[in-house]
């Protein structure tokens, strides 16, 4: 077999059986090899940012890596923003990047670039296969590397001649390492701090945002009085009825400071001490209150869930977690507003839904509206690079075809990766996109004030305004094969959501307020 065939066979043996791809000339032998390895599902994205974001969404739900296939350095560059989000989410991804044939690189052809340098910015694992006989072992190593706790992007660079030459062989999977245990002495030390009775907060992230972690966090809070908080943008958050409702740390620094006000101890578990997203004039970058001590229960990549459960057994023996009761908000009526659309979502959210949340400024009331809804997962914008929502929803739907996926998508960031709709149509994915259309970059209008810039005049306003002309998302979606409708009232949005959830395949609702 050739190098490409040995690569794909090794990936599938390692339980990587989906490849999101946007190939070019250097990757044609990989494309041809898909027919000889039918266990690998190839999913075409029309832009590399869709490819990388979909791989991120897939892995967050499937709990195993997907592969990407990208064309040389420029293809990797086009996908870099959503790989950045995946890095911040600690998502395991096997990134296959084609390269020029080894003998061709010295000619500095137009698409030649330093792929290793670009891949290195992701702070993950990078290797270049230089011999066809080594491709399979390199692929197995990449899969294992992607799953090293807490998860990372593993990039394998595959030159065209190494891919097409014969002499390849499949390799057996390399078993990934598990998370490191937290020493019992650390758990004991944190328990003693919480036992002092001094005001404390527990900030958790990573796997702690799933059911086991949430239940342990709730027990600790109930037993000690510590304030429970989750990181601002979890990769995957389980929430809804019959789960503990744990508040997320606020995005805006002044709100986060209010949540942490008065504490003497901050216990961090599976995340890092909080900092402001941006620097603001006259405001501190660190959000830990002055004089408060930071204590680490579990580093990122350690077994945070087991550590939380051990801590709960020490400080809250026999105490049960406090679970959220089931309730839905009252269905609103009349024109849609930035405040009431979330209640429509909460009122009709189906069982086992997956929410890809890139609502941005429009979604600040969403957690309260859905806290008592049927149990669901929320995938958030972990790295802050917009354009994630539609691709992540796409990948999540590939990973869980039996679950309804809802993309809550702001209009400005939708345009970064709008071609994800085409992939949803081609793959017949059950994704319902609620396109939140306020015809502006509303977050930037707010940030203009927060950074102390001068009041916006007509020239600066043009850079924040998405009208003139208005974006017609119904026609855009229909042009990509996705049925679409427009909603301007709560009743229309509820009707369109109910219809979309009852029909297979993707839908888009242009939600105007």
Image (cartoon, rainbow, N blue to C red):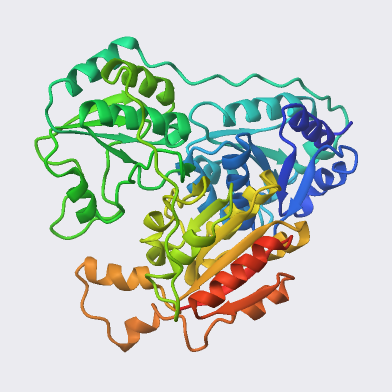
Q: Quadrant of the C terminus?
A: bottom left
Left or right for 249, reference 498: left
Mark yes or no: residue 46 visible.
no
191 to 476, vertically: above or below: above
Q: Quadrant of the N terminus?
A: top right
Q: Nearer the viewer, residue 192 or 252?
A: 192
Left or right for 475, reference 313: right
Mark yes or no: residue 375 visible.
yes
Q: Nearer the viewer, residue 220 or 88?
A: 220
Left or right for 354, reference 34: left
Q: Nearer the viewer, residue 30 or 243?
A: 243
Q: Quadrant of residue 321?
A: top left
Residue 316: % across, % down? 28, 21
Q: Quadrant of residue 450?
A: bottom left
Residue 198: % across, % down? 11, 28
Residue 239: % across, % down? 46, 44
């Amino acid at each position: 077999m050739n190098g490409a065939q040995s690569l794909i066979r090794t990936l599938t043996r390692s339980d990587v059986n989906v490849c999101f791809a946007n190939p070019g000339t250097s990757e044609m032998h990989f494309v041809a090899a898909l027919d000889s390895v039918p266990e690998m599902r190839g999913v075409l994205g029309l832009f590399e940012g869709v490819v990388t974001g979909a791989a991120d969404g897939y892995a967050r739900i499937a709990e195993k890596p997907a592969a990407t296939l990208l064309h040389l350095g420029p293809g990797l560059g086009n996908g870099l923003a959503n790989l950045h989000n995946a890095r911040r989410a600690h998502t395991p991804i096997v990134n296959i990047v084609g390269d020029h044939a080894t003998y061709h690189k010295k000619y500095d052809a137009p698409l030649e670039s330093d792929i290793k340098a670009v891949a290195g910015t992701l702070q993950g694992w990078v290797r270049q296969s230089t011999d066809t006989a080594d491709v399979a072992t390199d692929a197995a190593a990449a899969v294992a590397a992607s799953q090293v706790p807490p998860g990372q992007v593993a990039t394998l660079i595959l030159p065209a001649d190494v891919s097409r030459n014969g002499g390849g062989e499949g390799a057996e999977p390399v078993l990934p390492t598990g998370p490191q245990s937290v020493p019992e002495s650390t758990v004991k030390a944190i328990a003693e701090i919480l036992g002092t009775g001094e005001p404390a907060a527990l900030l958790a992230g990573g796997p702690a945002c799933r059911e086991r972690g949430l239940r342990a966090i709730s027990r600790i809070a109930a037993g000690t009085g510590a304030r429970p908080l989750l990181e601002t943008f979890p990769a995957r958050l389980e929430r809804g009825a019959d789960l503990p409702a744990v508040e997320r740390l606020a995005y805006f620094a002044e709100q986060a400071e209010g949540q942490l006000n008065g504490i003497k101890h901050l216990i961090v578990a599976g995340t890092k001490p909080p900092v402001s997203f941006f620097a603001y004039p006259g405001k501190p970058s660190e959000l830990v209150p002055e004089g408060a001590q930071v204590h680490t229960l579990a580093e990122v990549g350690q077994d945070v869930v087991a550590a939380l459960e051990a801590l709960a057994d020490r400080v809250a023996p026999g105490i049960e977690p406090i679970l959220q009761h089931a309730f839905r908000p009252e269905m609103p009526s009349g024109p849609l507003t930035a405040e009431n659309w979330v209640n429509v979502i909460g009122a009709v959210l189906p069982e086992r839904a997956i929410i890809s949340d890139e609502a941005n400024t429009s979604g600040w009331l969403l957690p309260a509206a859905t806290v008592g809804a049927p149990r669901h997962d929320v995938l958030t914008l972990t790295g802050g690079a917009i354009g994630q929502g539609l691709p992540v929803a796409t990948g999540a739907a590939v990973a869980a075809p039996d679950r309804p996926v809802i993309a809550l998508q702001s209009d400005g960031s939708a345009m970064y990766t709008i071609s994800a709709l085409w992939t949803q149509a081609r793959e017949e994915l059950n994704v319902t996109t609620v396109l939140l259309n306020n015809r502006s970059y509303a977050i930037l209008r707010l940030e203009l004030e927060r950074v102390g810039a001068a009041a916006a005049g007509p020239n600066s306003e043009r850079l924040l305004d998405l009208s003139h002309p208005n974006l017609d998302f119904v026609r855009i979606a229909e042009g990509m094969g996705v049925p679409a409708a427009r909603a301007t009232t709560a009743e229309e949005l509820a009707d369109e959501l109910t219809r979309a959830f009852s029909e297979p395949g993707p839908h888009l609702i242009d939600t105007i307020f």
